[in-house]
Image: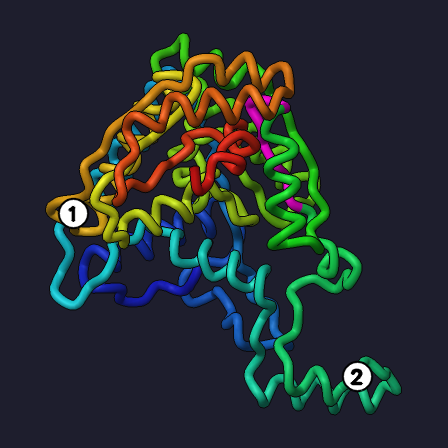
Amino acid sequence: MQGTIAPMAGHKGYGISLAIDFLSGILPGSAYGAGVGSPFDPDGKSGCGHTYVAVSIDAVRGWDAFVADAEALIDEVKSTPLAQDSDEMLFPGEKEARAEIAARRDGITLPARTRAQLIELAHELGIDFGGERFASRPARCRDRSEILMTPLVALVHATPAAFVPARDAFAAHFPEADLWNLLDDRLMSAATSGGGLTPTLRRRMYALIDHAHEQGAAGVLLTCSMYGPAARAASPLFAPPVRGSDDALLAELADTDTEHLLVAGSASASVDDAIDRFHRDWSEAGKESGPKVESVVVDGAASAVAADDVAALAESVVSACRPHVQTSTSVWLAQYSLRPGGQDCEGT
């Protein structure tokens, strides 16, 4: 990036401007100083130069260690006490990423003047594209209407047992989506044996998300609850929205009046991870005290899921949860794969 030398926030900004001219002007043999043309002059040549620097992280230190420290720094920045009248600490680029996500979802809102100019130009060129409709409604960010009508949503699974619950949920709430199932059936076992979501597993998940992005996915949903933190960390890094399996549930629980929360799962690692994320979100919401949280591991659930035995799954979930359920209890199933059994348990 290069521009003419000008005061930028005093002496430090002046130094940055000069460094930019050396690196992007003099070094590549482009224009520098007053010789750089204005970007607002459509007829003149800017002479602007560019310099790109690539750093091999593995040549400096291990990738996993770098990612772990980078995520720790991001967490530290976002946990900084907020200034008065501020609602959230944003990391650089996060605001822009959210704006792009909103534009991809809702369309790009153009100023009235711009819309009028485009309509006038279309009339001059004899192009009929529904100008009146365009004038009163935001333009979509893509020009392939068939993709917009059937957005491709990538579902990243750790078990094929999550396929059906996810499909049924989309059929009920987002039927126009074109679902794409991406399965890595070692994600759960790797997280369990590794003691949680390690930097290596985060990198593996980012690769899956990047693959979905490169193939044109309009959104990515991680159906394995243990990878929820990876979804949150990935959101500012990728253009399509990336969501964890229980993001909406966590947001709802952070604003709930529930007195007793029972977290049920087929493995202790999944249950412990769900409770940790609940406490983190509750704390980030500024709540000092929350519901009493209990956990239960549903014996037999994993084998019932593997056998696709919904009746056995429902029986195991009811048997495990019933002794802990009170009048004010809300039950949180920590895994998508338990949903078929849990659905039959409602009201029991």
Q: Amino acid at mark 1?
A: Thr
- Disc 2 crowd rating (10 Å Cα; few below 14, some 14-19, many 20+) is few
* SS category of the residue bearing label 2: loop
Q: Residue at x 60, y 36 (%)?
A: 165
Q: Find residue 107 and report its image quarter.
A: bottom right
Q: Looking at the picture, tell me which residue is in the foreground, 286 or 82.
A: 286
Residue 154's place in the image compared with 121, above or below, is above
The residue identified by callout 1 is 80
Q: Is residue 46 left or right of residue 271?
A: right
29 in magenta: no
How many dots with numbers?
2
The amino acid sitting under disc 2 is: Gly
Dot 2 or dot 1, earlier in sequence:
1
Residue at position x 26%, y 37% in the image: 326
* Residue at the image point whose x is 33% and y is 19% from the top: 65
Asked if residue 156 lies in the magenta stretch, the reply is: yes
Q: Main secondary structure of the magenta part?
A: strand
Outermost residue to the front: 348
Q: Residue furthest top?
A: 193
Regarding mark 1 in the picture, which secondary structure is present there? loop
* Relative to 299, residue 238 above or below: below
Q: Position of residue 34 (x, y in %)?
A: 42, 67
Asked if 78 appears above or below 267 in the picture, the reply is below
Query: Which residue is at the front of the view, 171 or 211?
Result: 171
Whether residue 254 is visible to the viewer of this picture, yes or no, is: yes
Magenta span of residues: 153-160
What is the CA distance from the residue labelled 2 to the residue labelled 1? Answer: 49 Å
Tag shown at residue 130:
2
Of residue 298 and residue 130, the one placed in the foreground of this image is: 298
* Classed neighbour count for the residue bearing mark 1: other residues with Cα under 10 Å, few (<14), some (14–19), many (≥20): few
**Do the numbered discs 2 and 1 sit on residues whose CB atoms are within 8 Å?**
no
